Image (cartoon, rainbow, N blue to C red):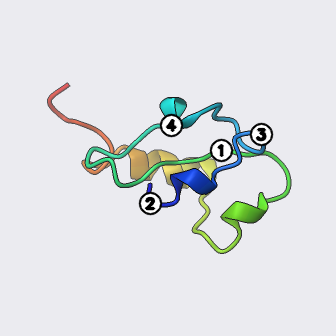
Amino acid sequence: MDDVSNIDFSQVKQTSEETLRLSIDKTKTVLKFSGETPSFLVGLQQYNHSEILAIMASPDWTNEEE
């Protein structure tokens, strides 16, 4: 989230900062894109669908009280 100002929302599936899914501590987000990796994401960790689902099911992303 430190680099949220670098996101080019025309290159990802999310439409604005308000539509980002945040981790419980609000320090991380996930961006989804199709095709080529947007230049602002080059060098950042990427996951496939099943990998990110497993990560987002963890306590860092899912409030178990809900």
Along the viewing direction, whichever of 36 and 65 lies nearer the viewer: 36
Q: CA distance from mark 3 to mark 2?
A: 19 Å
Q: Is there a contact, CB below 8 Å, between mark 1 and mark 3?
A: no
**Quarter holding residue 40:** bottom right
Point out the tag, 3 or 2, that comes first from the N-terminus: 2
Residue 20 tag number: 4
Residue at which label 1 appears: 32
Q: CA distance from mark 1 to mark 2?
A: 18 Å
Q: CA distance from mark 1 to mark 4?
A: 10 Å
- Give above or below for 46 relative to 60: below
Residue that protrudes farthest toward the top in the picture? 66
The amino acid at mark 4 is: Leu
The residue under the point 40% across, 42% down is: 22
Give the residue type at disc 3: Ser
Residue at image location 53% in from the left, 52% down from the top: 4
Q: Which residue is farthest bottom?
A: 43
**Looking at the picture, does residue 40 appear above or below residue 20?**
below
- Residue in the picture at 59% in, 33% down: 16
Q: Are marks 3 and 4 in contact (CB under 8 Å)?
A: no
* Residue in the foreground of this view, choosing between 41 and 3: 3
Which callout, 1 or 3, points at the residue further toward the start of the chain? 3
| Name of the residue lying farthest toward the left | 65
Q: Which residue is mark 2?
A: 2
